[in-house]
Image (spheres, rainbow, N blue to C red):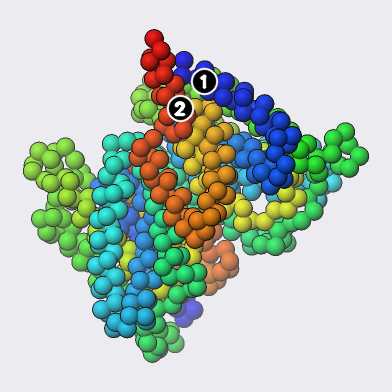
Amino acid sequence: MQFRPAYLALAAAAVGLALLPQIIVAKYYLHLSILALIWTIAAQGQNLIQGHAGYVSIVQAGFMGIGAYGTTLLGMHFALPVWLTMLLAPFVTALFALAAGYPSLRVKGRCFAIVTLAYNLVIFIVLTNWTSLTHGEAGITGIPKPGGPDGWFDFRDRATFNCLTLILAGAMTGLAWLIARSRIGQTLRAIRQNEDLVGAIGIPAWKYKLFAFVAAAAFAGLAGAVYAHYQSFINPEVFGLAQSLDAILAVIVGGSGAIAGPFIGAFFVVFLPEYLRFADAFRLIIYGLALILATIFMPRGIVGVASDLWARSRRGRE
Amino acid sequence: MIELVQQILNGLAIGGVYVLVALGLTTVFGILGIAHFAHGSVSMFGGCLTCFLAVSAGLPLLAAIAAAMAVGFVLGVAIELLAYRPVRGASHINAFIVALGLTMMVEGLNLQLFGHEQVVILTGLSRVFEIGGVTIPELRLYVILAAAALIASMTLFVERTRTGQAIRAVAENREAAILMGVNVQAIPLIVFGISTTLGVCAGVMVGSLFAIAPGIGEWLVVKGFAVLILGGLGSIPGAVIGGMVLGVTEALAAGFVSSAYKDLIAFAVMIAVLLMRPQGLMGKA
């Protein structure tokens, strides 16, 4: 019941975004839209661990970094085709997450957040300091776009790239939806509600948590890879703590646990700071205040508010 | 050998700062279960404010520190009342998101009030003692002593006073504390006030030992949480031992391995401890 308006909204948004290059002329908004779609992929992953399992992980941007550097370095050093490295990136990221997740999931609840935060810092330190591999703060330039100049599609064109990110974001949203409605998703939500009980009835909760963590990382890895090939330039700065916080915000502002939530939230975190540009120095303060007020007054996010309004209007009609 | 002693001493000074940050975090966590992520930014605010009061307002340094500590107490109370209290009953993720929002607000406030420039608190303490080849800058010694004094008074407060007893009671069993007539509405305010005051002290120490620059608040709070995880959540002795272990590990890593990777080594130690003792060094199993 609650999900039906969400499907409608999603379908409308997908059509709208596909037509976006025709509607808006300003290249800049198209650029933001592509970024928001990339963030949708990362936020859908974040939603698995944060929204469903109820574990806040603060390493999503770090994992995007592993995906971005993974695809770039694989392409540079092994001369692999772009499509292949983009496909490999989520798996590379998942491997890292598997190694990182095992010790960190031994701590329950809030401490997990801090441990993952430490991972993000570690990733950032390595990306910044291992200059022989990553070129440090200067970053890597000239990352090739998929397809190349004589491919079927010219992905140097933003409208074409917009379609690619739209398809990927749609596919990953679908995948997240499949996971959420499967037995795994059910178990994750059970863990959120009562982890001890899940353990008591003989379900190995840690396996499910690890799965959610690794899956979230794979989503982030793909998002990072798409980002790298879209921007053609990466440096560690965009994979820091602040960006991981954005992923968390996207989930909570959009509506955690709901399938449309991360999508709406991703557009929110990409577009709102842009609109707040007029406020200049006060931007950070306004953004923080908006966040606190949103958490206090609409803890279920935009999707929660929308579905409440929808339910109320239906009740009104009957 | 002398080099080793020297690095350990350096580690104790920075470890003292970590302990002060962690003490605030651990009491807040123990009582309210909140991961108070804005703590580092608030400490930074305290450091900047002290510098402002001492330089622009012309107060003597100690008076400036005292004034900043008082402002810190009020700020802590306000944060609890306005930001955390409204999300008390909700899931812990909500409190954490509020903490993130607060961090942004305090960071923004810092930029507005004190600008982007890095701030150094000038103490005028520049003498250097030398004992058996080990050089001890006067300032570092005072930082260690001040940290020790603050830790001792905090411990005495929690262990010996009636308010401290009430704080421990709420941490242990909130319902029972209410039944025993503890004012559970006032306790969080006191806890936040005191931990923010300790955070301000840590900020002053960072500002006088190194420098305060944008971004340092984040670094400080992450270290504070690392100490918490190392030492065991909600445990004051854990915070002290964890802070010292982290500070000394970092100093040794910086001195003997690589200063670029010192944080990485510190986190590796944290994760290794977690693997062997998930409850932390001093935590109860």
Q: Is residue B159 left or right of residue B65?
A: left
Percent across and percent down for residue A173 are 61, 28
Residue at which label 1 appears: A5
- B102 or B224: which is nearer to us? B102
The residue labelled by disc 2 is A306
Q: Residues within 10 Å of mark 2 (few under 14, many from 20)?
A: some
B30 relative to A282, above or below:
above
The residue positioned farthest toward the right in the image shown: A150
Which residue appears at 46% of the width and 33% of the height?
Answer: A302
Residue at the image position 53 percent from the left and 37 percent from the top = A265
Q: Is residue A256 above or below residue B189?
A: above
| Residue found at x 29% / y 64% | B72
- CA–CA distance between discs 1 and 2? 9 Å
Horizontal and vertical percent for residue A284? 47, 55
Q: What is the three-letter code of the residue carrying label 2?
A: Ala
Residue ranking furthest to the left: B181
Q: Which chain does the residue under circle 1 lie in?
A: A
Q: Is residue B13 above or below residue A183?
A: below
Nearer the observer, B132 or A280: A280
**Residue B86 percent coordinates (x, y):** 29, 42
Q: Nearer the viewer, residue A308 or A22?
A: A22
Q: Earlier in the sequence, mark 1 or mark 2?
A: 1
- State the SS at label 1: helix
Q: Amino acid at mark 1?
A: Pro
Residue B95 image offset from top left, x and y in percent: 35, 43
Q: Are marks 1 and 2 in contact (CB under 8 Å)?
A: yes
Chain at tag 2: A
Residue A301 is left or right of residue B36, and the answer is: right
Point 36% across, 86% down: residue: B125
Image quarter of residue B143: bottom left
The secondary structure type at the circle numbered 2 is helix
The quarter of the displayed image where residue B192 is located: bottom left
